[in-house]
Image (spheres, rainbow, N blue to C red):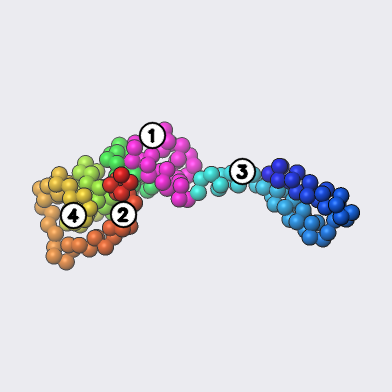
Amino acid sequence: MIFWLVLNLSFLALQLESEGSITGRMWAYQISTGIYVLDYFWNEEKMLTTWDIDYVSMSIISGYAGRGGHDEIIQRLLELDADRVWIMEGAARGGQLHIIEYFAGLSPLSQSEIDHLFKAACICGITKIAQYFVENNRDAIDINKGLNYTLDRYHNEDIQRYFRSIGATIPDDLIGDELTNALDEMIFNDEWYS
């Protein structure tokens, strides 16, 4: 920013040297950029935090930290007020049960969080995470939908076997409902990146 201010002042000096006077446009430019630079230094902390970490990159970092079970990164993200759902979704997709248990121990999961994380685990075929939600939230979980989620993407026989063992069936009106959302989920599919 200081370099930009010095560069602008050199334009002002060049105009004064070459034309003998400074135009109104040059003054307007110098004043407006000067105000911008002053505002930058006045609000520098806010500028730096919003430039480096925005909503999208925070969600991606949180998801991958949760998926990989990187506890130190997760703690740092929590200090930066990352949304715990992003971290837990990554954990659900990566089979990192200890992270979900940690957050559930801090405060009870809401119904929407349970639904979201259960669906993520089922779509990715992570049996131990789906089983955790079924065992700890049986009244809040629709095991038939869980089985349907497993049919949409990975066709993971282990998780399908688990759901069938606890009595899950797929009603005719449910089959394929989630297939329409396949593109929304595609960016999280490991095969998409390989």
Between the C-alphas of marks 4 and 1, the distance is 32 Å
Height in image: 140 above or below 190? below
Residue ranking furthest to the top: 72
Q: Indicate which disc residue 151 carries.
A: 4
Q: Amino acid at mark 3?
A: Glu
Please indicate whether residue 181 sits to the left or right of residue 2 in the image: left
What residue did someone put label 2 on?
Answer: 185
Determine contact: label 4, label 1, CB under 8 Å.
Answer: no
Q: Residue at x 21, y 56 (%)?
A: 152
Between the C-alphas of marks 2 and 3, the distance is 35 Å
> Which residues are drawn in magenta?
55-83
Q: Crowding near pointer 4: few (<14 within 10 Å), some, many (20+)?
A: many
Q: Position of residue 138 (x, y in %)?
A: 20, 50
Determine contact: label 1, label 3, CB under 8 Å.
Answer: no
The earlier-in-sequence mark between 4 and 1 is 1
Q: Position of residue 73 (x, y in %)?
A: 42, 36
Residue ranking furthest to the front: 18
Between the C-alphas of marks 3 and 4, the distance is 48 Å
Foreground: disc 2 or disc 3: 2
The earlier-in-sequence mark between 4 and 2 is 4
Q: Residue at x 23, y 44 (%)?
A: 126
The secondary structure that dominates the magenta segment is: helix
Q: Residue at x 55, y 48 (%)?
A: 50
Q: Amino acid at mark 1?
A: Asp
Q: Crowding near pointer 1: few (<14 within 10 Å), some, many (20+)?
A: few
Between the C-alphas of marks 1 and 3, the distance is 26 Å
Q: Position of residue 87 (x, y in %)?
A: 37, 44
Foreground: disc 3 or disc 4: 4
Please indicate whether residue 158 sits to the left or right of residue 65 in the image: left
What kind of element bears circle 1?
Answer: helix
Q: Indicate which disc residue 47 carries.
A: none
What residue did someone put label 1 on?
Answer: 71
